[in-house]
Image: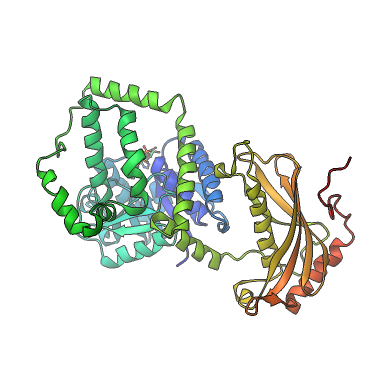
Amino acid sequence: MSAPCAVGLLGGGVIGGGWAARFLLGGTDVRLYDPDPEAERKLGEMLELARSALGRLSAVPLPPEGTLSFVPTPAAAAEGVELVQESAPERLELKQALLAEACVAAGPDVLIASSTSGLRPTALAAEMGRPERFLVAHPFNPVYLLPLVELCGGARTAPEVIERARVLYGSLGMAPLVVRKEIDGFVADRMLEALWREALWLVNDGVATAAEVDDAIRLGAGLRWSFMGTFLTYRIAGGEAGMRHFMAQFGPALKWPWTKLTDVPDLTDELIDEIVAQSDEQAEGRSVRELEQLRDDCLVSVLQALRAHDIGAGAVLARHEAELADGVSAPVMRDDDDLSRPLALHGTEVAPDWVDYNGHAHESRYLQVFGDTSDALFAYLGIDRAYLMTGSYFTVETHLSHLLEALLGDRLSVTTQVLDWDERRLHVFHSLWREDDDALLATAEQLYLHVDTAARRAAPAATTVLERVRRIAEAHASLPRPERAGRSIAISH
Ligand SMILES: NC(=O)c1ccc[n+]([C@@H]2O[C@H](COP(=O)([O-])OP(=O)(O)OC[C@H]3O[C@@H](n4cnc5c(N)ncnc54)[C@H](O)[C@@H]3O)[C@@H](O)[C@H]2O)c1
């Protein structure tokens, strides 16, 4: 299923803003109601973060962005949309009234969902008309990067509504987890609350500081959790004897017990002051925006690493990328394209993990950018998945010149000039530009050889491809030859 055409959002704070970013960047129009006069500014800042993170996350281009409109009432947000997603403050009466108002305006088939972290759907739907179309869809911050969304129906939610919601959120690249029973806190927040309660006790009892508690998670179990969770991790911890042995070995400890169970420390002024002071120390003067940027940078790197192993959130990302690649094909040359200048087929941004010990993009990243440009060129010539079954261009020679540094965050674009061609060979010259000031950062001259992919031997390209190559080459013949074309490496004395 493709992403919905339009959704209505009630509340545009941390979570509503994250939903807006996920929907808009997934190509869905958003109608947002939020009484906060600052909502537009806050959302604009979050959208910038999301564009930067999602732009770097995947090589597959995102669909064209949806349109955002701010609307004056909850009813206006619910008009003409496929889903209403409520993300207002966590107060039962406020949410009940808001959802009831939106429901009156929403069409009968519109899904109505709440982002609540722990309120039960049956209670939330108490004031609502047609409660069978209501469910909780509980996401995680930042909504535009983390795939998990817990779906929980209430006593009157129709089973087909859960199924529709599962498909809809899945179409956004999310991983819906259907909660089997209606409980407070659903699955994830029940576990997170237990951890949070223990963390508060450890600080309250002077056992550890806030920073030490965080280290105890992020330097150990936290690293494992992102790909194996709890049960799979403990299966390995049981050694060759596996889960049964682990249960036998560590089961009795649960009865001692090490933990404070459901006791909660009194949140006295002293405890709160202490936690706030320790938290300020941990932040080391960094603003929330800087910490959010750091969080997103790390999440992008973790997601990319997990994608390589096709596990956890990385597997969700890989699946969504495959769907996007099917739906959004790279541009193919059209009859009326202007070929009088070098082709502009690829753009990207210097990501944090591209930067090496010299503070600029590592040399392998330049080759990556030119390689991605080659792929865009081949797609432009009409080489699609079907064509690749029989033929493809392979790169047989590259001469790369580094002229200026590509620094973190630089927006890059590449232009490509065709220098020469025959039935089997294609000779091109790429120029890598920094978009901000049009500075030329690097060039790459490349020779591609067309190959019969079944026989793994050089073979002529298809006539449709050659016809496109011919048209570009003829148009580019009148361009000046790039100054660095044909250079060899030498020290001139
Ligand atoms: N913050 C999280 O990590 C997190 C995670 C998952 C779910 N949630 C849930 O998401 C919901 C929103 O939480 P948040 O963290 O985004 O809070 P938030 O305070 O950042 O945002 C709430 C937004 O709702 C707006 N608002 C206030 N009254 C409103 C009304 N009557 N109608 C519409 N909007 C109104 C506020 O102006 C604000 O922009 C809560 O139910 C919360 O439990 C939060």
Location of residue 329 in the rendering, given as x and y in whole percent from the top left corner: 60, 66
Closer to us: 72 or 94 = 94
What residue is at 35 percent from the left and 58 percent from the top? Answer: 176
**Ligand 1 quarter of the rendering:** top left
What residue is at 78 percent from the left and 67 percent from the top? Answer: 426
Closer to us: 21 or 398 = 398
Q: Quadrant of residue 410?
A: top right
Q: Can residue 308 be seen in this view?
A: yes
- Position of the C terminus, as image quadrant, is top right
- Position of the N terminus, as image quadrant, is bottom left
**Image: 356 above or below 342:** above
Q: In which quarter of the image is residue 72?
A: top left
Q: Is residue 103 visible?
A: no
Horizontal relation, residue 152 to residue 43: left or right = left
Horizontal relation, residue 463 to residue 242: left or right = right
**Image: 133 above or below 121:** below
What residue is at 76 percent from the left and 79 percent from the top? Answer: 463
Horizontal relation, residue 398 to residue 111: left or right = right
Location of residue 148 in the rendering, given as x and y in whole percent from the top left corner: 36, 53
